[in-house]
Image: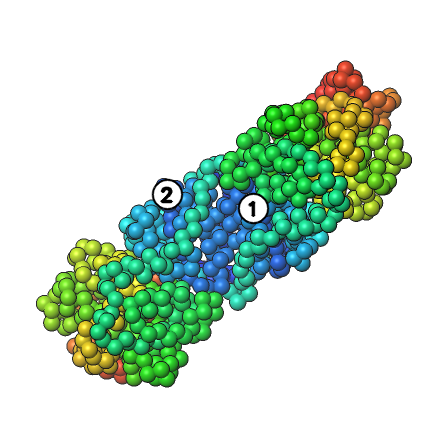
Amino acid sequence: MKPLKIGVSGVRGVVGETLTPDLIVGFAQAFGTYLGPGRILVCRDTRPSGPMVAAAVMAGLLNTGCDVVDLGICPTPSLQLAVRWLGADGGISITAGHNPAHWNALKFVRQDGLYLTPGQAEELLDIYHQGRFEKATWDRMRTRVEQGEAIQHHLDVLSASFDLAAPRRRRLKVAVDCCNGSCSLLAPRWLATLGCKVLAINDDPSSPFPHTPEPKPETAGQVRALVKAGRADIGLVHDADGERLGLVDETGLALSEEFTLALATDIALRHRVGPVVTNVSTTMAIDRIAARYGATVVRTPVGQAHISEAILEHGAVIGGEGNGSVAVPRVQASHDSAATTGLLLCHLAETGAPLSALVAALPQLTMLKEHVAIEPSVIYSALQEFRDAVQDEAGTSVDLSDGVKVAFADGWVHVRASNTESMIRLIVEADTSARATELMDWGRDRLRP
Amino acid sequence: MRAIPTLKISISGVRGVVGDSLTPDLLTRFSQAFGTYMGSGRVVVGRDTRTSGEMVRQAVVSGLLSAGCRIVDAGVCPTPTVQLLVSKLRAHGGIAITASHNPPEWNALKFVGPDALFLSGARGHELLDIYHQGEYTKARGTRIRVVESMPGALDQHIAAVLEALGPLPADRRRPRVVLDACNGAGSIVGPRLLEALGAEVIGINTTPDGRFPRPAEPTPENLKALCAAVREHRADIGFAQDMDADRLAIVSELGEPIGEERTLVLAVEHVLGRTPGPVVANLSTTHALEPVAQRFGCAVFRTPVGEANVTEGMQRHRAVIGGEGNGGVIYPRINFARDSLVGMGLLLHRLADSGRTVSELVSALPALEIVKIQFPFPSQRLGEVLRKARREYADFPMDLRDGVKVMLPDAWFLLRGSNTEPVLRVVAEAASEDAARGVAEKVRDQVNEWLA
């Protein structure tokens, strides 16, 4: 199986293998045909293939008669805010998020700054497959302009969304690992704006990724060392494009990425009680935290498009996913690691409590994740067989909104197809690790690819 | 079967109409093929000012990067600047994005090889083979190389001209020059070069926005504004460039176009006066060259039409100067390319050295007038038409290297299919314009009869 994934979360592949200029030009033309002709923002993360992909994207967009506003290297959430700020008709963020450096992808953003919904993404795919794109004649051909202020605008929005007085008084010491990604241009500036003493590493956007740009305990080694050596109050790990955030407490302990949303939920609900949005795969700690405040939890299928839409529909006070992605609706309804940083640091500064104490007050659960690589042609039959196998299990209830999620009295098992790779993911959670292992065995036994 | 009239893929490049056949996917694939052919080396990219220029440039950049190339981005610049940079930087190749004199809806890629010459012949065929085979080098995601911008590209070109020719003599009156850059790639560099040479410059159509103020071809009928400006400003000379500033036409101090053919003749006179040597021109260039070269005891060699053929002939014959009758002057001491900047430098020096006016210089040239006509034509019938022409004119001396060229007693004509457009071209030269037009139109009527 070649690494290429064309689906509702965009087009994603390995440069040098499947993600060719041809394919990118085709998708950019489809997007320009779908939204345009209009003004489209384009940004990229720091992968070496970024300029190649960006050039193909811009050629495709220009050919459909779109105006291209080139934001250069810029986090995805900065582009999402800039779409509304500049009155643009949409945007394309060139980033493979947490995937390794040889991957790249296109993320499609609408006029309101949100990702295309699955329905819209399917329309875009239809246009791509039909291959009949708008073509601008020479007298309607527009050009590319550079816009270097999107990150500054993002900082302005962040500053206006939080009360900066407490963090500026407290002057927290923060260790941050930008993974040499596009957050290198945003995170240190935002921390300085918050009055923090900043210990930044891997903040050079012209250098390669020092580790996989996926914030989780395995990639937090450098920032853990930095927290300890620098006696920092907190350590932060960014992905390549500013969506996911991983945390390290003041003792140098790296937290599971599931804790980012759990902490954010606890903080948000302390300030204002309202609905919480997360996907079906995210820790049930969210439900237990919400229950403490009498708040409701809305569960969606996996993927940012679903989260953002539910945040707006339910007027949620917080939303996000278990991979470290959090949307702070007062900033924007999209995943934004800088907004997440603002929420956490303002709270730490206001309460003066150490991060480890905040974490200790959260429900402590064990989550296990596994995946089974599987041919795309049999993914759906494997899921169907799993569903048949677990349908009549006593003492469970089954949720089919995204794959198959089986809820037990004391935990859950979720089996779903990955949106980004050709694999089935198994996620289980329980109060104890022994029970979690038991549930994982239970799920694996019933999944026969 | 109907040919697609808006796309022309040949060994001299790929040319088409934007919004129609010249799509970004075609352009990226061609650039991938070229990057593959150039061994993933360093490639210079420049473009003219056409409205589609940025779209095409982005497609080219994407294709080249994907093939593992390093790119030197010369930005908006004349085609000869791309060739000059390939040579000066010892790059592996170059792509000039321009449809030179074609109307604004056209654009094209012109491929430059490591010797700074346009690809042609066998090398052009090899590139086409790679394109059609579709097996391009694909650099892995972590090994994609960078785009270096080259803000000093135009300065290097100006410096090269000045270094070879020197500034105009300081003890003479500064010539007053009007330049019509057609809002093309010469808009910025043209006035700067002329000032650097020491001329007083008045620019018209020097806004590089790709909005054609006139048809791009610098033929006499397209130069009315320039003629008026020369008269209004009492200028010594008017220069007109095409979109990519490879071709140069001249307007005399009287405000009259002297005819594109004479650009090369005047440049040849100047160069041979200082450095006698062989001259090379294509088959359709004025026969005024031969008597002028003879005055200096020099020979003229003819080649098939196309810059690549001319430069190849120049290398073979070690020419000191060469070019084409369409205003393309090639002076290898500076740049092995048709170069209007070089042409302007040579012409201003010719005026300064001779102390005469443009019209005086022109009146001393052999009295020959050339007429070029073209008409739409089903390209698949080219062979048949050329065969009939050969039979019809079998009694006269002929040159069959490129179409059919016939030497009549008081005139000559050349009948050939265009390399760039689906048209048939007839070029005829005789002692007067009427006589030349008579010959050309007779050939056209004969062709139409054969096709009927």
Between the residue at mark 2 and the residue at mark 1, the CA separation in whole angstroms equals 25 Å
Q: Element type at marker 2?
A: loop
Report whether B190 appears left or right of A382. left
Q: Element type at marker 1?
A: strand
Instruction: Tell me if residue B443 comes above or below residue A378 in the rendering.
Output: below
Q: Are marks 2 and 1 on the same chain?
A: no
The extreme top residue here reads A434
Residue displayed at 88% across by 31% down: A292
Residue displayed at 81% across by 43% down: A316
Residue displayed at 22% across by 70% down: B169
Instruction: Tell me if residue A117 comes above or below residue A320 in the rendering.
Output: below
Considering the image in quadrants, where does the N terminus of chain B appear?
Answer: bottom left
- Label 1, on which residue? A73
Q: Amino acid at mark 2?
A: Gly
Residue B85 in the image: state x and y as whole percent.
33, 53
Whether residue B259 is visible here, answered yes or no, is no
Residue displayed at 33% across by 51% down: B86
Residue B427 in the image: state x and y as whole percent.
28, 72
The extreme front residue here reads A169
Residue A77 in the image: state x and y as whole percent.
66, 45
Q: Which mark is residue B41?
A: 2
